[in-house]
Image (cartoon, rainbow, N blue to C red):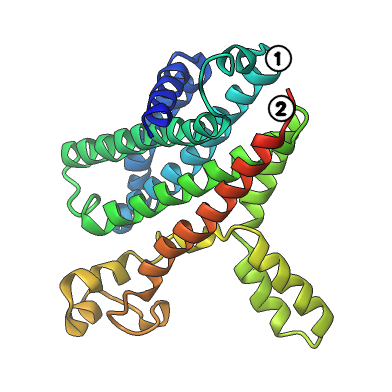
Amino acid sequence: MRETWLIGSNVFRQLLRNRILVVLFLFALSVVGVAIFLGDLGQEAEVRLSRDFGLLSIEGVGFFTVLLCNVVLLFEETELKTISILFVKPIRRWHYMAGKVLGSTMLLLMNETAMVGLLWILARWRGLEGVIDLSFVIAAFYLFLSGVLFSIVAVFFTIYASTVPACAVYASFTYGLGHFTTNLLEWVMRMDQPLLAKLVKVLYYLIPNFSLFSLKDNLVAIQLLLVGSKADYYAMGGDTTILTGPGSSAPYIWPLFYLLFYGSALLLISLWQYERKEY
């Protein structure tokens, strides 16, 4: 574990020195500013628009952060041959693999924390109440978990992709498809095509389901869990159709188990394949 932490912290510092990621960080902060001022277009829906666009910005920046992190590391491994120098030292390959995931996760956490903090400061400055509350922080935390899973997926593709562009395309396609597998399965189940339904089910279980972590449409439902009262939920304008039952915590516990089991399985497969890879 010590070796993994040392490699992860070194990867984090290495990524911080990269100019592309610095530009991405500045872009992330500017997008948060746009999220606040975009609320002027919504007039009475100013707070809701700021919250929705803020979460959308966090999700998008998280995607590019993880993608660029792994693309940069893969470029240095394949083109600059830094991996050969590293493996001369008494470091196991799985230490380096786990360290890459840890380093990109640390950078992702820094970016998302900074975005939430700046959004809170700008909301206070503009006198907007309710933009950043506990439900928003919980939704942002689940987006961070989605980024952790995507980091594992991206690392998985760095093993099999022969070039940097191929890795970026594979990871991006999987990320996009992972947001629509649930809707695709529901659509196919309505059709009278048993064979097609079986194929989509296989795809549904193989592709990582990133839509589980998107709670930006359920912020009111999260408030229900916090206030614990159905009457307060209705007063807040809640709709029970977005819950498995008013006050149910199942939609929020299941993503945690999904990340634990699916992410661990994919990471173990990546570590196993990485040990067999020739350099």
In this rendering, the label closer to the viewer, 1 or 2: 1
Q: Please name the residue that numbered disc 1 is placed on.
A: 79
Q: Residue at x 44, y 42 (%)?
A: 57
Q: Residue at x 45, y 48 (%)?
A: 56
Q: Nearer the viewer, residue 194 or 61?
A: 194
Task: Name the residue type under label 2.
Answer: Val
Q: Is residue 27 above or below residue 51?
A: above
The picture quadrant where one finds residue 250 is bottom left
Q: Please name the residue that numbered disc 2 is placed on.
A: 164
Q: Is residue 80 above or below residue 149?
A: above
Q: Residue at x 72, y 69 (%)?
A: 202
Q: Secondary structure at mark 2?
A: helix
The picture quadrant where one finds residue 247 is bottom left
Asked whether the residues under the numbered discs 1 and 2 touch, taking CB atoms below 8 Å apart as contact, a structural biologist would say yes
Left or right placement of residue 21 versus residue 128 in this view: right
Q: Secondary structure at mark 1?
A: loop
Task: Name the residue type under label 1.
Answer: Glu
Left or right placement of residue 100 versus residue 47 in this view: right
